[in-house]
Amino acid sequence: QKEVEQNSGPLSVPEGAIASLNCTYSDRGSQSFFWYRQYSGKSPELIMSIYSNGDKEDGRFTAQLNKASQYVSLLIRDSQPSDSATYLCAVVNAGNNRKLIWGLGTSLAVNP
Amino acid sequence: DGGITQSPKYLFRKEGQNVTLSCEQNLNHDAMYWYRQDPGQGLRLIYYSQIVNDFQKGDIAEGYSVSREKKESFPLTVTSAQKNPTAFYLCASSSGGGAANVLTFGAGSRLTVL
C-alpha cells in the first residue's frame, strides 16, 4: 500500500461544476495535510493546508479532513478552465522523521 | 518580491559530465530541499538542509551532491554517477516551526542528457 494515494484521473468536469479530489494516507499519526496545484511544465504551488478534522474553506476551495477514515479531499466549486491542472496531495508522515510524503497527483480537466 | 530562483531553466548534458543546478532564495527560510520529478513517479526527495552547513540525504541521493554554505543558497550537483539524470528538478524552501512543511517552490530546472 502506498503511503499517500490519489486517483490519477483524468477527472473531467464541466465548467461551473464542483470538482472533488480525494487522497488517502496510511500513517494514522499524520497531522499535517496539504494540497498543491501544478500546471503542466510548471512547479507546484500551495492551495490549501489543513491540520484539524472538518472543513476549511478558502474562496472556491474547500479542504476536508477525516482522520478516522484517513482521507483528505479538495473541493473546487464553480470550476473554471484555469483550474485544469494536476493536484498533488502531501502528508507529513509522523512515523518517518516527519517527512513530507507526496501522492502522484490527480489530473483535472475543466471543460468549457 | 521574495521567492526562489532556479537556474538554468533548461540544461543539456553529455553523458559523463557533472552539472550544477543553482537555487537561491530571499525568503529568509531556514530549510531548503531538492526534489526530482519524473512522469508518473511524483516528487522524490534528493537532499534537504535545515540549517547552514548541514544537509541530509533524501530518498534518492545517490549520484547527487549538495552544499549549504549560505542560508540563501543550496546548489545541487548531478554527477556522472547518476545513471538516469534526465528529469525536472525542483528546489523548495520552508520556514521553521509550524510552517515547517509549507513549501515554496522555484520554477524548476529541466535537465536532459544527450
Image: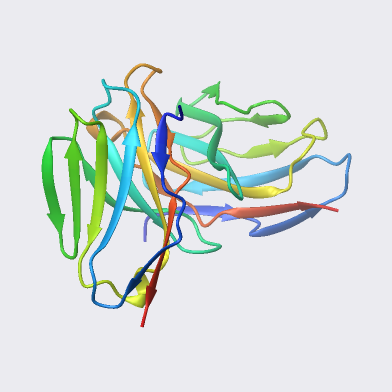
Looking at the image, is B26 positioned above or below residue B55? below
Left or right for A75, reference B39: left
- At x 12%, y 47%, the residue is A55
Q: In this view, does A108 lie above or below B77?
A: below
In the picture shown, does residue B4 fall above or below A30?
below
Q: From the image, which quarter does the N terminus of chain B lie in?
A: bottom left
Q: How is the image coloured?
A: rainbow
Indicate the quadrant where residue A65 lies: top left
- For residue B51, say whether it is visible: no
Above or below, B88 against A19 in this view is: above
- Please state the horizontal and vertical placement of residue A59, each as a whole percent of the image: 16, 64
List x then y, in percent, for residue B56.
53, 21
Whether residue B34 is visible here, answered yes or no, is yes
**Residue B24, image x and y in percent?**
52, 47
> What is the quadrant of residue B36 in the picture?
top right
At 49% from the left and 52% from the top, the residue drawn is B106
Please name whichever residue, B26 or B98, is drawn nearer the observer in this view of the structure.
B98
Left or right: residue A31 compared with residue B114:
left
Between residue A36 and residue A8, name the one nearer to us.
A8
Q: Residue at x 85, y 41 (%)?
A: B17
- Image position of B20 (left or right of B67): right
Q: Which residue is the extreme one toward the left?
A: A54
Q: Is residue A65 left or right of residue B110?
A: left
